[in-house]
Amino acid sequence: MSAYYVMGLDIGSATAKAVLLDESGYSLAFAVRPTRGRLVQSAEEVKQEILAHTGVSEEAVKAIITTGYGRDIVQNKTKSLTEITCHARGAYATMPNIRFVIDIGGQDSKAILLEPDGQVGRFEMNDKCAAGTGRFLEVMARTLGIHLDEMGDMAIHSEKYSKISSTCTVFAESEVISLLAQGEEIPAVVSGLCRAIAERVYGLASRVGITPPIMMTGGVAKNKGVVNWLSRILNQEMIIPPEPQIIGALGAGIMGLEMIKKSNEKMNIITQNT
Amino acid sequence: MSQRVPIRATAKMKELMGFYYMMAKSAENDPNQKIAWITSGGPVEILHAAGVIPIYPENVAAMAGTMKISDEICAIAEEQGFSRDLCSYARTDIGSALSGKGPIMGSASPKPDLLVCCNNICGTVTKWYEELQRIFNVPLIFIDAPFQYGIKDRPEAIDYMEAQLRRMMEQVSEVTGKPFDMDKFMETLELSDRAVKLWREIQDLLQHKPAPMNSFDTFIHLAPIVTLRGTQGCIEYYETLKAELLERIEQGIGTLEKEEYRLGWDNLPVWFKIKFLSERFSQHNAALVVSTYTRSFCYQAEDRDISNPLRAMSADYLAGYINHGLDFRERELTEMVRDFSLDGFVMHSNRSCRAYSFGQYELARTLEDKYGVPVLLIEADQNDTRMWSDEQVGNRIDAFMERVASKKQRNIA
Amino acid sequence: MSSNIKSVLEPFEKVKDDLYFFARQAKQNGEKVAGFLCTYSPQELFHAGGYFPVRVIGKEGGTPLADQWLQQYACSFAKGVLNLGLTGDFSFLDLVVFSHTCDTMQNLAEVWRRRVEGMPIIVVSTPNLNGGDIALTYLKRELTRVKEEVEKISGNTITDANLLESIRIYDMHRNNMRKLYEIRRNNPSLLSGTDMFTVVLSSMLMKKEEHNKLLEVLITELQKVPSQKEDKPRILVGGSVCQAQGFIQSIEMSGAIVSDDDLCMGSRSYVIPPIPQGDPIEMLAQMYLSRIPCPAFYKPGYDPAGPYIEKIKSGNVNGVIFLQTKFCDPYGFNYPYLRKRLEQEGIPSLLLEVEQNQPVPEAFRTRVEAFVETLIK
């Protein structure tokens, strides 16, 4: 039985994620829920879900570190940190030799260079536009009348891919419609869309300076089509952690654990001195 | 330090600028008082010497930006077919010229009798002033300051500038109907020279820790050097400001409760978000202490011939930061990092300003890879609020400061 | 179109499949090739210095490598060529020549110099003040400096005689191109706009000596054809597009004929008034300052609507289509004024924003078709 626990909460635009760690840093459980625009509520739900699931009491949670777009809205948090810091920390904890993180979330994508000791180096985020994000795929899935989850498999099984030149969501949508009008097969279009995202993310990553090994995190890492295209375009293997969506929450939890340990050290120094 | 101590001179500056704009506005109805619109990097000393009142459309556009009326004025230009991709200063100014709407006592700048355009800040002004000429149908003096690709400025370019400035004197005297007063001109050059040196000294005072004011202040205190250089009032104002800053240094007064991090700023300010940015960086105990933008108004040529003031002036008007290629810019940036003890650089990738912004990715990479300086790029616009998102920019600043902080902690440890 | 003309056009068409077909051929023969990014580069100087000057042009497709160095709001021309520079597609060039025009080209030259490896670059500091003795003096000094730089890089001395000969060849070429434009102005159906732009494109990618020969044959053949009555609406294409071909073709597929243009990679660069024979550097400087100015430049007293109205009247043009490259400032600032002037003249116009590295979008076709429908009476 752990003396205390730490929770990492990642409140993103599409989903809320929670990870619970014990004092040794062992991850006890995680939970993911869609936010649907209700940030505060979903943060509370995901927190309660994980507590109920593990049977850990709220009082035993010594620190709650929040991250993601909704990080400042969450009440009773110990501290909030940006996704950049948390994704880097989470990725490093999962695999200490990781030098580069590509995170494609619902509303943004980022590329982060990690120093060899796991600290954040240079990073970039997409500009004010949905291109190269999960949102782009979501809109396109709707246009094509297919389910978002089908897209990955569809893309990797298609030998052909359509050339989608616009990464602007609005223009790409009309491009997709005219491709279909010209008789393009849906899987080829899907593969083309995955390629368009990968190209866009490549631009972001190359500005940071691509340095393997590369880990991919965020919901879109589950889309095999995008992953496949990214590794082709970057000419690098993409390492996908078992649960790519929760890496930010995991990183937040670890940052919390480190904070507690640091303040304990300080306490020890003070007690020794007195 | 616990309380933020405001800079007293600010009130004096507001008075000075208010007086200047009032005078300019009242001159509009005086047929004997000529008014010229001029670019911020333009050779204004010739105008002062000839008794012509200079108006700076860029300054007026920035005022519209801080007053948050630029969007609606831009929309007027956009209705006329000016694309939203064009410079937001130009759109603000053209919209203002077309509609009479503007930030000066509720209206546009007083109408010009003359236009003076110098392209040492960008090529956009060439097009912008051409349009102003079509709107007002007054003479346009165009001064072509060749972009200097190398670190050392080319002598043929200085000769070219000198010939153009000589011709400008003739053109100005055609407008005023009076012969050009060479003695008055030499006096004006000296006043301008002193103001420029003072402005540089003031900015260099920010090397002190804690910095007695920050870049968000210098953005505001920039107005006199842009609009009034070459006048006695400008010198007096900066002497007051300098004395106050020296006093602040002596008393250890900074601008933050605790100045932990020092940053540089590149490119124009985001005029409509000065407060947001200032607060966001303050939350991280970060002070912006130097900017390439405010320093642009104190460049003097490296080997200027002071025995020949017109020649020195010709060289000075080529010598600015953005009239130079990337090798020059790299040198300037790294000197700022060194002299101002910077922990990082913030670069405003300014959609309106291709001259300033293209090359930033290259410089950012060079600062990071060659010099180990963390760089944050903020994608925004100087005057167009539609390119902005508080959420996104705030998030980037937070992440960047987390990075700067952890880097600094590691370096200490 | 007669079969004669068809066969005359064949050699021009080689560049459609491979832009640098002739450049590579020359390289194989051990010649040196210089790439230039702008029609303001004094090609005559490079020609006289022993180079085969070809235009640097991008191609269709994304620009992921260039996106590292240029922001999203950089024009597609700059990004397109930088991308090919970075992929090594231009490694066959012995020299790359930039000219100072707009802010984007200025900084592109800088990024290129620092990031594209494998060849030297020269930047010509073209004065942005066009006209007057002051600018002329500056340009003469600049061209002299460039000449010396070319000599240093190439190891060849450029004599006055060499340079005068190069000027003669280029002059002849401009004359021939002007003649061709004149023929089409009176009788556009003799040669479609699409074919015309193949000729224009090839003019920047073939040796001028060869191109002159082909042009002379083409002109002779066209002069033999009796003039025909043409009822298609005549369109003048203006704006800032460098690779206009696909767009021209799309416009002509909608039932109009592109009978004239006001494009830099089109008629603008061929209009130079005759310059008296003299010192070749002086001649070059005069020529470049007396051109229809690049919109990035200031020319005292020049009216950008002038060439439009003149061509519209002399060539019975029915409408104008502006092909504006997104993020092109110099043309963007001219547009509102041009639109107004055309309105005053009763000439309908259509503005289309284009990206040069993308295929002609569906929406483009729809808008062009609708515009052409309004012109058919």
Image (cartoon, rainbow, N blue to C red):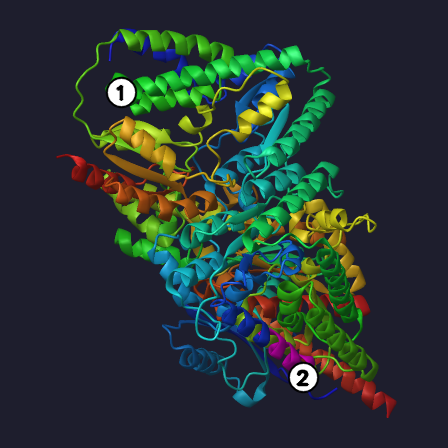
Is any part of residue A22 visible from this angle? Answer: no
Q: Position of residue A231 (x, y in %)?
A: 52, 44
Return the residue at label 1: C186
Q: Position of residue A139 (x, y in %)?
A: 33, 57
Residue drawn at 31 percent across, 47 percent down: C340
Residue sitting at the far left:
C377
Magenta region: B6-17
Q: Nearer the viewer, mark 2 or mark 1?
A: 1
Residue drawn at 32 percent across, 29 percent down: C311
Amino acid type for the residue under numbered disc 1: Asn
C-beta proximity under 8 Å, tags 2 and 1: no
Residue sitting at the far right:
A273
Q: Position of residue A127 (x, y in %)?
A: 49, 58
Q: CA distance from mark 2 to mark 1?
A: 73 Å
- The C terminus of chain C, quarter of image: top left
Dot 2 falls on which chain?
A: B
Question: Is residue B15 rendered magenta in the image?
Answer: yes
Q: Mark on residue B268?
A: none
Label the magenta part by its dominant secondary structure. helix
Dot 1 falls on which chain?
A: C
**Residues packed near mark 2 inside 10 Å, few (<14), some (14 to 19) or many (20 plus):** few
Q: Decide: is A254 above or below A137.
A: below
Question: Depth check: B207 or C303 in front?
Answer: C303
Q: Position of residue A158 (x, y in %)?
A: 35, 40
Q: Decide: is B295 above or below C164.
A: below
The answer to which quarter of the image holds residue B4 is bottom right
Question: Depth check: C126 or A14 in front?
Answer: C126
Return the residue at label 2: B6
Drawn side of residue B316 relative to residue B246, left or right? left
